Image (tube, rainbow, N blue to C red):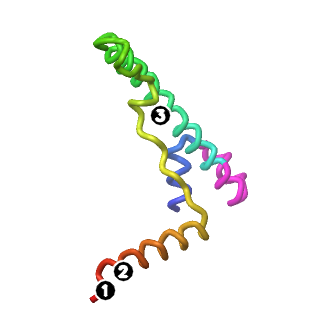
Amino acid sequence: MQVWAQSVVAGVPDDLYWASTPAEVAELLDAIAERESRQEREAALRAGLVASEVRNTMRQKDSDRVWQAGDFVKKAPVRLSVEESIMAMRAWAADHNRKYKA
């Protein structure tokens, strides 16, 4: 029922949902989420463009940096593979144990 509810919220018509396999529904929901994420990023970049223009008009001299729209947009988190996550956790644990070893 949760997947059906997500489909309804995402705007998937009932007849399309019930005619699709679970894998097709999952792909459809992933595509919708990706589209919405891209639209949000584009909206954030438009806002960043305005912010960068305002900031750049207030620059003091050529020594001040020129701001870009992306400077005002939160960066997407880096996705690590399982192996990279394990390596990062082991490195953190080794560092932690080294600092707090009695």
Secondary structure found at label 1: loop
Distance between the alpha carbons at the discs numbered 2 and 3: 42 Å
Question: Residue at 38% of width from left, 20% of height from top?
Answer: 52
Q: Which residues are magenta?
A: 12-27
| In magenta segment, residue 22 | yes
* Majority secondary structure of magenta residues: helix
Outermost residue on the bottom side: it is 102
Tell me the kind of residue under disc 2. Arg
Residue bearing mark 1:
101
Q: In the image, residue 100 lies at what x, y percent?
A: 29, 81
Q: Nearer the viewer, mark 1 or mark 3?
A: 1
Q: From the top left corner, tell me how far across and down residue 64 is, in percent.
A: 34, 19
What label does residue 40 carry, if any?
Answer: 3
Q: Amino acid at mark 1?
A: Lys
Q: Residue furthest front?
A: 63
Q: Residues within 10 Å of mark 3 (few under 14, many from 20)?
A: few
The residue under label 2 is: 98
